[in-house]
Image (tube, rainbow, N blue to C red):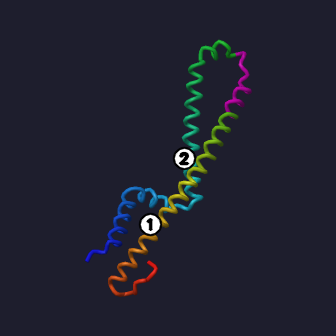
C-alpha cells in the first residue's frame, strides 16, 4: 500500500532540491559573516570598476573643456570631490549589499531548516515502516 504522506514529503523534497535548494546548499558552505563579507567585497570591486568607467566617460565627454582650461582647473579640489563621491557611493553600496546578503543568508537558513525537518519526518516514516520505532500519535 502506498503511503501518501511519504510520497508527499518526497515530492516536496525533490522540488526543493531541484529549484531553490541548489543555491541554499551553496550558501550552507559558508558562515554568515564570511558570506556577507565576500559578497560585499565583490560589490566593492564592481562599484569601483563602474565608478572608474563613469569617471572615464565624464572625462572624455568634457575633454574639450579640460584641454581649453588645463591651467585654470583646481585639480586638487576636483580630485577631492571625485574621491569623496567615490567613498560615499562605495560605502552606500557595500552597506546595502551586506544587509541584502545577510537577509538572503537568513532566508536560506530557514528554508534549509524546513528541508531538514522534512527529511527527519521522512526518516521517521521509514523507521516506522521497518518496525524499528513505534508510530507517534501526534505526528
Residue hosting label 2:
42
Q: Residue furthest top?
A: 68
Q: Residues within 10 Å of mark 1 (few under 14, many from 20)?
A: some
* Residue 126 falls left or right of residue 65: left
Q: What's the distance in space between the residues labelled 2 and 1, CA to CA?
A: 29 Å
Point out the frontmost of discs 2 and 1. 1
- In the depicted view, which residue is nearer to us: 33 or 105? 105
Q: Which residue lies furthest to the left in this view?
A: 1
* Residue 9 falls left or right of residue 82: left
**Residue 134 painted magenta:** no
Residue hosting label 1:
115
Q: Is the magenta stretch mostly helix, strand or loop?
A: helix
Q: What residue sits 56% from the left and 42% below the top?
A: 45
Image: 14 above or below 46: below
Image: 125 above or below 66: below
- 2 or 1: tag closer to the N-terminus: 2
Image: 18 above or below 73: below
Q: How crowded is mark 2: few (under 14 residues within 10 Å), some or many (20 or more)?
A: some
Quarter residue 13 falls in: bottom left
Q: What residue sits 68% from the left and 14% below the top?
A: 69
Q: Which residues are the magenta region? A: 71-83
Image: 73 above or below 9: above
Considering the numbered disc 1 on the image, is that residue within a helix, a strand or a loop? helix
| The C terminus sits in image quarter | bottom left
Considering the numbered disc 2 on the image, is that residue within a helix, a strand or a loop? helix
Q: What residue sits 54% from the left and 57% below the top?
A: 105
Amino acid at each position: 500500500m502506498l503511503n501518501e504522506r511519504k510520497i508527499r514529503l518526497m515530492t516536496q523534497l525533490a522540488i526543493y532540491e531541484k529549484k531553490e535548494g541548489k543555491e541554499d546548499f551553496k550558501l550552507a558552505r559558508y558562515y554568515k559573516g564570511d558570506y556577507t563579507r565576500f559578497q560585499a567585497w565583490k560589490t566593492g570591486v564592481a562599484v569601483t570598476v563602474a565608478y572608474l568607467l563613469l569617471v572615464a566617460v565624464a572625462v572624455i565627454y568634457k575633454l574639450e573643456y579640460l584641454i581649453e582650461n588645463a591651467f585654470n582647473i583646481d585639480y586638487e579640489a576636483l580630485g577631492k570631490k571625485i574621491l569623496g563621491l567615490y567613498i560615499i557611493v562605495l560605502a552606500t553600496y557595500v552597506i546595502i549589499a551586506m544587509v541584502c546578503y545577510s537577509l538572503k543568508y537568513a532566508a536560506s537558513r530557514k528554508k534549509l531548516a524546513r528541508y531538514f525537518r522534512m527529511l527527519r519526518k521522512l526518516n521517521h516514516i521509514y523507521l516506522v515502516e521497518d518496525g524499528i520505532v513505534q508510530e507517534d500519535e501526534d505526528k
